[in-house]
Image (tube, rainbow, N blue to C red):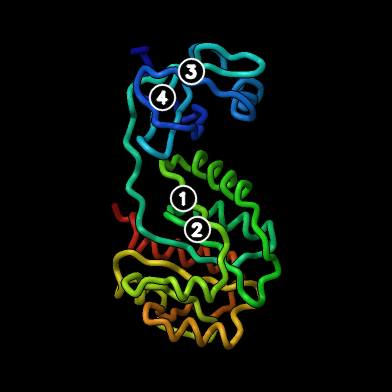
Amino acid sequence: MPATPASPPRSAPRLFVAGPLTGGASVVLDGPQAHYLARVMRATPGDVVILCDDLTGEWPATVSTAGKRDVSLTVGERLRPREQVPDFTLCAALLKKPHFDLVLEKATELGVRRIQPLLTRRVVADKLNLDRARAIVTEAAEQCARTALPEVIAPVKLDALLRAWPDNRVLFFADEQGGAPAASAFTAHPGPAALLIGPEGGFDETERAAIRAHPSAVAISLGPRILRGETAAIAATALWMALAGDWGQ
């Protein structure tokens, strides 16, 4: 097996690739990833790249050749296994593209397991390019050193989500009209959870009543101020991770 640094430099590029990866395997990258390594990072033979496959964990790989069209690497010994991700789903109503892009990026950095985009009556965007969304979370995962990619699910309507929601998974509902303080609610309901965040215009009264009527729903308050959709999603996710997620590990 090829020799690789015991501790690859923190500046080593990180990429998610198709797996599973194994020690000693040869990996050939082409397209945008090859362009990034060869043209942007100026990778040359002997340089170390960190590869993740969302299956087995994180691996160092040494550049063998760096051409105009592809880059060949040889995988070394695994650095760490795939991380254990808290069982937390962010159910966020679609926002305008730049705002929802921010939600995708920051939810990934914060450590969510799933992102479920929602369609509600007051959404201003009713479509999501899933390939683009998954590219955003992949890039965010590479930048924050995650070894597991969050699952980005196709958008669903709110009523469909509520009909299919299991009774044994709490659904925290950020209600502008009030609820239990988020911190106390998160502490009182440990275990697998999800967070429901509305669109720019909020939920209408029919939607709010349907959510509150669901046996798994727990209405929460995110403080005395009205938050934008992206702010609410990021702030509440961070609070859950601190109180019930993996930030204390």
- Position of residue 123 measured from the top left corner of the image (x, y, whole percent): 66, 71
Q: CA distance from mark 2 to mark 1?
A: 7 Å
Tell which of 239 and 64 is nearer to you: 64
Element under label 1? loop
* Rendering coords of residue 164 (x, y %): 44, 71
183 vs 220, nearest the viewer = 220
Q: Are marks 1 and 3 in contact (CB under 8 Å)?
A: no
Q: Across the whole image, how many numbered discs are drawn on residues?
A: 4
Which residue sits at x=41%, y=44%?
148
Which numbered disc covers residue 115? 2
Q: Which SS class for mark 3? A: strand
Q: Amino acid at mark 4?
A: Pro
Look at discs 2 and 4 and give the one toward the viewer: 2
Earlier sequence position, callout 2 versus callout 3? 3
The mark lying in front, picked from 4 and 3, is: 3
Assign a secondary structure to mark 4. Answer: strand
Question: In this figure, which residue is indicated by the disc labeled 1?
Answer: 150
The answer to which of marks 4 and 3 sits earlier in the sequence is: 4
Q: Are marks 2 and 4 in contact (CB under 8 Å)?
A: no
